[in-house]
Amino acid sequence: MSTLATPVRAAATPNYLTSERGILSWLLTTDHKRIALLYVFSVTAFFFIGGFFALLMRLELVTPETDLVSPHTYNELFSMHGIIMVWFFLIPSIPNTLGNFLIPMMIGAKDLAFPKLNLASWYVFMLGGMVTLWAMFRGGIDTGWTFYTPFSTVYSQTYVTGAALGVFISGFASIMTGLNFIATIHRLRAPGLTWFRLPLFVWSHYATSVILVLATPVLAVVLSMVAVERIFQVGIFSTPLGGDPVLFQHLFWFYSHPAVYIMVLPGMAVVSELVAAYSRRPVFGYTFVAFASIAIAVIGFLVWGHHMFVAGQSVYSALYFSLLSYMVAVPSAIKVFNWTATVYKGSVSWETPMLYAIGFIGLFTIGGMTGLFLAALGIDVHVTDTYFVIAHFHYIMVGGTVMAYLGGIHYWWPKISGKMYPEGLSKLSALTVFLGFNLTFFPQFVLGYLGMPRRYAAYPAEFQYLHILSTAGATILGAGYLMPLCYFFWAWRHAPEAPPNPWRATGLEWQTPSPPPKHNFEVTPVVTHNAYDYEGMKEELGLD
Amino acid sequence: MTDPSALMLREQFGTPEQQRESATFGMWIFLATEVMLFGALFTAFAVYRMKYPLGFDEGSADMNILLGSINTAVLIASSLTMALSIHAVAINKQVRGYLLLLATAALGLVFLTIKFVEYYQHYEQHKAPGISFVSDKPQAAEMQMFYVFYFVMTGFHAIHMTIGVCLVLVLALRTAAGSFRPAYHTPLEAVGLYWHFVDIVWVFLFAIFYISGLHG
Amino acid sequence: MAGQVLSTKSYLLTFAALLALTFTTVMVGYIDLGWGSMFMAVLIATMKAILIASFFMHALLEAKLVKLVIAGALLWFLIMVTLTLGDYVTRAWMPYPGK
Amino acid sequence: MNSLQLLPESASTFANEWNWLFWMLVALCGFVATGIAVLLIYWVVRYHRKREDELPVQIHGNIKIEAAWSLIPLMLFMGMFAWGARVYFRMERPPDNARAIYAIGKQWMWKFQYVTGQREINTLHVPVGEPVKIIMTSQDAIHSLFVPAFRIKQDVLPQRYTTIWFQATKPGRYHLFCAEYCGTKHSGMIGWVYAMDAHEFQLWMEQGGAEGSLASTGEKLFHQFGCATCHHFDTQGACPMLRDLYGRPVRLTSGETIIADETYLRNKILNPRAQLIEGFQPIMPTFSGQLTEEQVVALIAYIKAIGPRPGTELPVSPGNAPSNYGSQQGIAGPEATSISGSKPRDR
């Protein structure tokens, strides 16, 4: 692969999909675009596995009693759902698929800085996923995705060590990706592409990478300690030797709170692109949105204790964690306001990705605002560990990240596949997802507010109406997710060919054929425009 | 193009300089993750050390300061040979660089050997929590916690050392094969950074485990 | 960092300084300074770490960007330590069990 | 199927404060969220693309607007923070006169013990109009005591005590949940809180079938386990005096001073040598593994109940007047000649 650059290949321009053939050309590829597609297949598979567990849970919760599955099985279902969705779908979802595909193209590079490391990350990720799945199907896992001690180390009878090992391994994939992105964004930008000409997608991914790199090792340590404690029965976080379970929570949330931003910052990255492209306007307050990403990454590390307001930490540390949590809400608010303002006096088209972006803004606003409730110390005491929290983080992660992921896949689908997607069907699916999502999770806010605790296999009968509503919504949501799966498979072969720039967007990725050639650009681009410079590029884009 | 560094230039880079800077920069980012990895362990250690000063001091008092000091010296010496080997390759003395790399790996192995001798001594003295731990000291439980951290943290370090020795040996072979030149020896520099970092971690482990309870 | 600027001599001097500091820390360790024992041990270790980073790792000669990475890593470690220990230090302030 | 319920019960003094704050936040956030939604949808419709090659007016931003929508939310957030913290601190600080009830969580049940000796499993009877403080510990994994109608929740940890307090305002029967996932039957670790008016509660206490107060159980254990051979109450032996101990600062050999609260007493009983007290040899054996959580609670209740030496003034350490200090009349320590204390005290 280390042949000299050959710019002479332009003639019949095979693209990255056709330049090499055969299964090995995929499994041994170092092309960031192909690795991105490997990741697309993997995370989609994990998404539907995790979603299947969720559906079983929702079915169980139709009745107050445990009649579909036993309480133990229910506990395993929510644990597997959480572990798979968090570490094998949400964290890699946007960065490793869209990020991997687009960052080099957006900065005018031929590939990431370390292509072999990129491929290695996919293998490591798959290894982690396989180990986790093996542990789940061999001995189950019933600790919840949080692995709280001493339950996970002393009382659980399931394959905690195996599942922790799988997550531990997948953590290395995260670190490799983050490291690769940071080095790439710093070192491989095309001539003329200064930091403040970067698309906001790149800024947001840069912030995400910083978190990946600095938070993930702490997860590795804390899971290793859980494994050591479980294997040797020495209580690092449990009691016989004076260990403190609250310390586990500190270290766990030091990773896992920033991990929430690993999940949502890439979603914000996508939405910034979509809003600009479909309003044909630069994102309002570009610098503010860019720095808001960085601020979220930094302040996001200072707030983890808000998961522990009733966990037995000091009231004074609860105080500073609450204060800092409100601080991190400011940059998120800034982003929402700026996206909304971008639409003002724009030229707004209603293509599917834009519908997803609008959905994202609405749902993320609700998710973020309920976060304000949870950050308020007095309010949190009642609603923490209830369905209120579940609804809150699903609004962020499903209403936010998954909507952005779907929007992004639609938006860049012409670039990825060289084909369009069916517009009518995709609008229908976007609408289905939006309605199904709200019907699933809005009742859960009410449930939590009423005091329904989370992780309950059985529940008092007065909560049943709301649970039925939620399950009904979940089936609609499930159908909404299956539709894109089907029509994208169809579109890969049968949809009409896509032009290089179907949306008349400004990014560098649109200035190369669809699908792009192996090295992205036939000639390394020289950047003379700011991001989203519709005015300056109006001739090229044919705008008037 | 006859410049040997150009032959090693990967397609995504424009110039050898860009590639070299990216590689060392990537290594530094990796070291930042390592800081957080060991940082989490140091944080947990700090919490318990603050809660149980007596038990942790007593645990520390039982450490073999002689072996610990020798190991510190060995590791510092290995850092020196590592730095000198890179220097040698940089001034086009590949054979010297090769020998110094072998010396580095050998010192690393000496360190690991001594470390395992110590582990065995702890085991013999029933200071291995989870396997055999006996103590008649009043703070037996807290001492045990001290040893848990001792084994976990030095164990993490020993794993890093093992990886480091393997990397250094591979690089020694590549140096012998003539892969590196003054103009291109980026892998050597990257592994050198890693090696020195592992040394730094040991310096702190030595301080908190061996020195802090020495007076007891 | 542009090329190898440091000489063999500077490496040897660094090595000697590190050995001397190791010897010092052991000697100081034999004195009972109460909480100061741990403090001195970590202080001397920090000095050794600075020597290794500055000379063996050429951190001083690296680009600003690398220095930023180093500073960032240390800052993040401090965040973790400070906010975690903050909990343990302040737990006793409120005189009710478990608060 | 019960009827659809959309408002939670509100049956404690916190519930009102909580409701106020909650609905203020709902109103504020609802207003802003609606504003964003309306503007967004209106603009999306209003500025719908007219022709394919339309180039709209290019607006890049406005620093004043940015400053406004950064600073105004920040100020609102600080207000939310302050209000939330105010409510929280009231929840976290039990009043000095609160009635203490001990709770032990285990997989998968709640055990409650009253100072007066009554015991309950998965039900808790409390008087209306009187502050009640629950001192909790876990026998195994982490649990969390949650009473939605009172808006209170606190994790229950092994090897240490956490407290929670409330003052019920309305007689009735309310859910009691375990809110921290604790294993297979986590959802079965539920029960009821019965809030009763003072008179009924008194009647219930009298029929409660107590076999002597918790402190008197503790006293029996104190003798049974031989504590009395070394711990004298009024004379200093080889072991620390226990009279006047609870709530007082204790100097450790490490130079630290810690307050002798429930967790401290518990640690001293179960793991006495972890922290050595200045001036004493580490001669106390550990009782870890020999005492159940219930027995530890009884011993602590006993140590707390030993009043000051007759005739001395009630000691009050600043900011920390232990509520039950000396409240058990008749407990005077092993040197006292007669022991009673099985009778519940009128409050």
Image (spheres, rainbow, N blue to C red):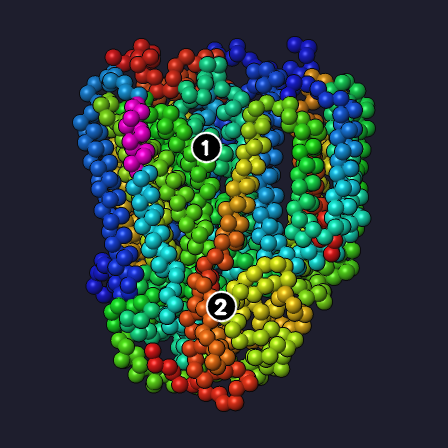
Task: Please provide percent x and percent y for residue A136.
Answer: 50, 53
Q: Please give left or right for residue C18 compared with residue A453 in the image.
A: right
Return the x and y of residue B184 as percentages of the image width and height: 68, 19
Name the disc covering residue D247, or none: 2
Q: Is D341 above or below relative to C37?
A: below
Q: Answer whether residue A412 is visible to the viewer in this image.
A: no
Find residue B194 and report its image quarter.
Answer: top right
Residue at mark 2: chain: D
Can you give x and y, in whole percent of width and height, for residue D320 in the image? 44, 65
Does the magenta segment cover residue D67?
yes
Which residue has dot 1 on it? A207
Q: Measuring 28% from the left and 38% from the top, which residue is drawn there?
A: A362
The CA span between labels 1 and 2 is 49 Å
Relative to D181, is D195 on the left or the right? left
Q: Is residue A287 above or below residue B124?
A: above
What residue type is disc 1 on? Ala
Q: Disc 2 residue type?
A: Gly
Secondary structure under tag 1 reads helix
Q: Identify the residue at horizontal 33%, vertical 55% (top origin).
A: D87
Secondary structure under tag 2 reads: loop
User: Where does the magenta region start and end?
Assistant: D61-73
Residue placed most toward the observer, A34 or D347: D347
Residue D49 position by quadrant: top left
Q: Quadrant of the C terminus of chain B?
A: bottom right
Query: In x, y percent, where is residue A296?
Result: 42, 36
Q: Residues within 10 Å of mark 1 (few under 14, many from 20)?
A: many
As for residue A250 lying within the magenta part, the answer is no
* Front residue of A53 and B109: B109
Give the letter of the chain under mark 1: A
Question: Is A451 rendered above or below residue D79?
Answer: below
